[in-house]
Image: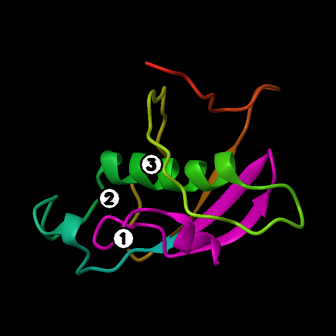
Amino acid sequence: MAWIDCLPHQPPMRLLEDVVDVKHGERATGLRLTRPDDFYFQGHFPGQPVVPAIILVELLAQTGGIAAAAPPPGEPPSALQLRVAALGPFKFPAMRPCADAEDIVFRRKRPEPPFADRAC
């Protein structure tokens, strides 16, 4: 199974187009190329398209889900059923034209796993 196929999301909300790197327990790098006809540009500053912050957050969540659920080396990836429970804080880079590419990288910043199983 390819990493991208582990996501439960389907178009148009599968925003990641490719997963280019996964390191178990540490990071994942995802890729999405923006296009002028992407659905989120239809009403978000027509004529001056800007990727909405919530789209960037969702890209981080999808990439982070793959990073959090990555199996140890040698084990195949499997379908994910993770849900986001908390977010932030976030800082976004300065506005860029929509033709530019961005690598979306999720890196763990603390020694414990970024996600924990919790019963509600």
**Quarter residue 72 falls in:** bottom right
What kind of residue is marked 3?
A: Ala
Which mark is drawn over residue 51?
Answer: 2
Residue tagged 1: 98
Q: Is residue 84 left or right of residue 31?
A: left
- Mark 3–mark 2 Cα distance, whole angstroms, equals 11 Å
Q: Residue at x 15, y 59 (%)?
A: 45
Q: Circle 2 sits in a helix, a strand or a loop, which is it? A: loop
Q: Mark 1 or mark 3, which is nearer to you? A: 1
Region rendered in magenta? 1-30
Which of 100/63 is in front?
63
Query: Which sits earlier in the primary sequence, circle 3 or circle 2?
Result: 2
Residue tagged 3: 94
Question: Is there CB contact under 8 Å for labels 1 and 3?
Answer: no
Residue 44 pos. (x, y %): 16, 58
Say above or below: 45 vs 76: above
Q: Residue at x 54, y 56 (%)?
A: 80
Q: Say few, some or many: other residues with alpha carbon within 10 Å of mark 2 (under 14 / 14 to 19 / 20 or more).
A: some
Question: Is there CB contact under 8 Å for labels 3 and 2?
Answer: no
- Mark 1–mark 3 Cα distance, whole angstroms, equals 12 Å
Q: Residue at x 72, y 55 (%)?
A: 70
Q: Residue at x 41, y 61 (%)?
A: 96
- Mark 1–mark 2 Cα distance, whole angstroms, equals 7 Å
Say above or below: 94 vs 76: above
